[in-house]
Amino acid sequence: MGYKENFAAIDWSTPLPPIERHASYTRHLRADVSTPMIVSAYECPVTGKMIEGRRAHSENLKQTDCRLLEPGEFEDTKKNGQKRIHEKMDAAIDAAIDAVAPTLTI
């Protein structure tokens, strides 16, 4: 069962358990690593399956045809996303009108 189906059944008053830190994870020792750190398992919002570890995370991204956001991409989408959507809709409407207009007789 995915998180969407059982969202109302979640007991939000229960505190979350502490995140376990692995001995090998230390920022100053791993500063050269630029990949995201998967510390614990999570539920994939697309498939509802539990994802545990980096390999499973990478395979899940490939299977669901998803990708990680590039730096600054979220902010750009937040700033310009609606504008781009409206521009695409305007272009589609213009194309539809241009296709139909020659067939109309007045």
Image: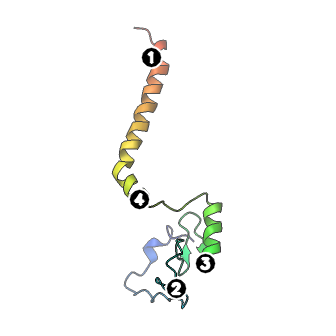
Q: Dot 2, crowdedness within 10 Å: few (<14), some or many (≥20)?
A: few
User: Residue 57, how many percent across, how many down?
Assistant: 60, 71
Residue at the (38%, 39%) spot, across then down: 86
Q: For the residue marked with disc 1, what is the amino acid? A: Ala
User: Residue 96, how many percent across, how many down?
Assistant: 47, 26
Say which mark, if any, is on residue 101: 1
Q: Which residue is mark 3?
A: 53
- Discs 1/3, front: 3
Query: Alpha carbon of mark 3 to alpha carbon of mark 4: how far?
Result: 25 Å
Query: Alpha carbon of mark 1 to alpha carbon of mark 2: how far?
Result: 64 Å
The outermost residue toward the bottom is: 23
Say which mark, if any, is on residue 25: 2
- Sequence-wise, the earlier of marks 3 and 4 is 3
Q: Secondary structure at mark 1?
A: helix
Q: Dot 3, crowdedness within 10 Å: few (<14), some or many (≥20)?
A: few
- Sequence-wise, the earlier of marks 1 and 4 is 4
Q: For the residue marked with disc 3, what is the amino acid? A: Gly
- Sequence-wise, the earlier of marks 2 and 3 is 2
Q: For the residue marked with disc 2, what is the amino acid? A: Tyr
